[in-house]
Amino acid sequence: MNKVLYITGTVLLLAAILVGFTTSGNEQPSQTGDHQMETEDTKAVGVVNEEEGNLVTHLDAVLTSVDELKKVIEETPDELRAINEKGEVIEKNWDEIEKQVEEMDSDAYANIERSLYPLMAEAQKENPDIEKMKSLSEKVTEKIEDFKQQISHQ
């Protein structure tokens, strides 16, 4: 078990380092039609849409992982290991966007987390309450879908 955790930690650390050193190419100025130099700061208007699109993609990943958990608890509720793994996946996917959601709308963030954190905690227990998880997963799905609708209308 310790060996698996060590390997997983090492892989995650290397992935984080690689992501940190890669660039999107926005550091290089580009020429416009008027021969003016354009930098990342002058493109700020386009970045908002890109970030929202990225956020929606990550929200979809959270929704997909919640749906996968729902499927496991409905079809094979005795598969504790699968339930635990799905809970970890939900947590990983949420961690990627948690700060961005909070900065965008702190009320929606708090609302989502009131159901999401109990769901993740329940999914990672040795003896999870299946009925509680079904209820929480429905609430989480509804709240995230509502948030997606909200940001798409901004």
Image (cartoon, rainbow, N blue to C red):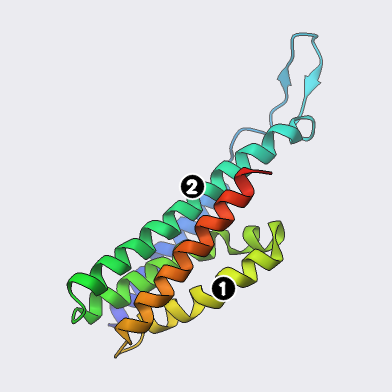
Q: Report if residue 22 is visible in the image.
A: no
Left or right, residue 60 beside residue 114: left
Q: Position of residue 83 (x, y in %)?
A: 28, 76
Q: Is residue 91 above or below residue 61?
A: below
- Which kind of residue does numbered mark 1 sit on? Glu
Q: Which residue is the site of mark 2?
A: 57
**Which residue position holds label 1?**
113
The answer to whether marks 2 and 1 mark residues whose Cβ atoms lie closer than 8 Å is: no
Using the image, determine if residue 134 lies above or below residue 145: below
Q: Earlier in the sequence, mark 2 or mark 1?
A: 2
Q: Quadrant of residue 92?
A: bottom left
The picture places residue 66, in percent across and down from the top left corner, at: 38, 65
* Residue 58 tag number: none
Which residue is pictured at 68% across the width and 37% down the height? Answer: 47
Callout 2, which amino acid? Answer: Thr
Front of the two marks 2 and 1: 1
Q: What crowding class fits label 1: few (fewer than 14 Cα within 10 Å), some (14-19), or many (20 or more)?
A: some
- CA distance separating discs 2 and 1: 19 Å
The residue positioned 43% from the left and 76% from the top of the image is: 136
Give the x, y percent position of residue 142.
48, 62
* Label 1 residue SS: helix
Q: Nearer the viewer, residue 95 or 146?
A: 146
Up the image or down, 75 lies above or below 151; here it is below
Q: Residue at x 37, y 57 (%)?
A: 64
Please tell me whether mark 2 sits on a helix, a strand or a loop. Answer: helix
Q: Residue furthest bottom?
A: 127
